[in-house]
Image (spheres, grey):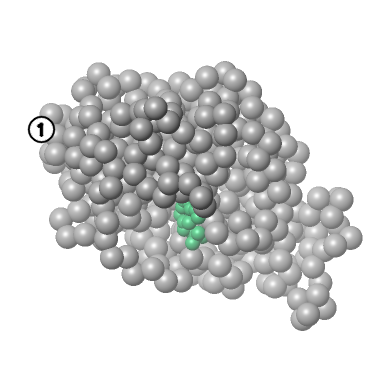
Amino acid sequence: MTKLFEPLTLRGLTVRNRIWLAPMCQYSVERQDGVPTDWHLVNLGSRAQGGFGLLLTEATAVVPEGRISPQDTGLWNDEQRDAWARIVDFAHAQGAAIGVQLAHAGRKASTYRGFAGEPQNGTVPERDGGWEPLAPSAEAFPGYDAPREMTVEDIQGVVEAFGVAARRSVEAGFDTVEVHGAHGYLVHQFLSPLTNHRTDGYGGDFEGRTRLVVEIVDAVRANVPETMPVLVRLSATDWTEGGWDPEQTVAVSTVLREHGADLVDVSSGGAVHADIPVGPGYQVPFARAVREGAGLPSGAVGLITSPEQAERVLESGDADVVLLARAALREPAWPQRAAAELGVDWHEASYPAQYARAHWTSDLLAG
Ligand SMILES: Cc1cc2nc3c(=O)[nH]c(=O)nc-3n(C[C@H](O)[C@H](O)[C@H](O)COP(=O)(O)O)c2cc1C
């Protein structure tokens, strides 16, 4: 038996394997109303058919001004909830678990989606459907408009919005909620000393900068059943002197565990421009640091592409699950090929009955 195909239980949820689909923005809500569409159903649905254990949705905004682009999905109203429910039901029918990544983009909101033939960067002006971004401090991400500094009332509104979105996630049937605390979006902007220059209780020292993420996890926990796991995605480091770093990531993960978080999905970067030494599995050591240092399960993500590499991450105790992003876009049924490559019986690889006649064999792998 491989580790990749071993089920994982977090609270009341048992996931069929440890190959998870990483959250990936599709920027495909053409109506700009945050309601997921047939694109989202097919995109997530095909990876559920392809054997992924748990699918994470793209960053899904808890308030309209929390969207990265006007074409992002949301979960701030009942129409969005009901559209998500259809996608959740399909994933469940394929035996996959599905979680929603709840997000607020902060100063990196109201940006162009960067599709070919469209503007590549900068802030979308209000006349084109954009809005004024909010952030811990009134400092722009390079190339974007300066955000407005949030008042304490704004901050408390965001915390409440995460709670309400978590309640709607439960109503939609999601199995878990992931708080997006990475990649330089709002929560990370509060965590990092490079982007948080507040002098009130939401800034300054470690306790002040981590207060928002702790309050958000509390708000989410208060709105989901005891049996539902809560995940948090963090950037382990800003890759910049004087920034957020792995020690603080382990420390906040320990606090979040005490507040009921069940797994930290460990990424890096995004708060500021930095030289990142990108390479195969480059973020895996951070997942190990969180797992060992904070004593809770962790997820490894970032240039994990081959079945052998993914299996090794789990075998060596670096992480409890692997998350695949771009490899899963290239190959929706990556887990089913991985099973064959690792010598796992195809019956363990969650093929839909409709696809059983096409299962991978060693002859096919040999080409
Ligand atoms: C098209 C695309 C969209 C992404 N959107 C999100 C997102 O919504 N939330 C998030 O946390 N990460 C997002 N990411 C980052 C991925 O989840 C992942 O961390 C990153 O791509 C590294 O993994 P990979 O090497 O397997 O692609 C996105 C990545 C891609 C390629």
Query: Mark 1 belongs to which amino acid?
Result: Thr
234 relative to 217, above or below: below
**From this viewpoint, which residue is outermost toward the right?**
357
Q: Residue 319: percent from the left, percent from the top?
A: 47, 60
62 relative to 21, above or below: above
Of residues 310 and 85, the one nearer the viewer is: 85
Residue at 71% from the left image edge and 66% from the top image edge: 337
**Closest to the observer: 249 or 119?**
119
* Side (left or right) of 220 relative to 315: left
Vertical comparison of 51 with 96: above or below: below
Q: Residue at x 39, y 40 (%)?
A: 111
Please identify the quadrant where the C terminus is shown.
bottom right
Task: Judge by depth and name the residue closer to the eye, 143 or 262.
Answer: 143
Q: Report the residue at 14% width, 34% height from top.
A: 198
Q: Residue furthest bottom?
A: 366
Q: Residue at x 71, y 54 (%)?
A: 50
Residue 346 visible from this viewpoint: yes
Q: What element carries label 1?
A: loop
The location of residue 63, given as percent across then percent down, is 42, 25
For the question of whether residue 211 can be seen, the reply is no
Q: Could you tell me residue 330's position as x and y percent?
A: 63, 61
Answer left or right for 12 relative to 101: right
Describe residue 237's horizontal placement relative to residue 351 as left or right: left
Q: Label 1: few (<14), some or many (≥20) within 10 Å?
A: few
**Which residue carries the number 1 mark?**
199
Report x, y in % for residue 71: 51, 36
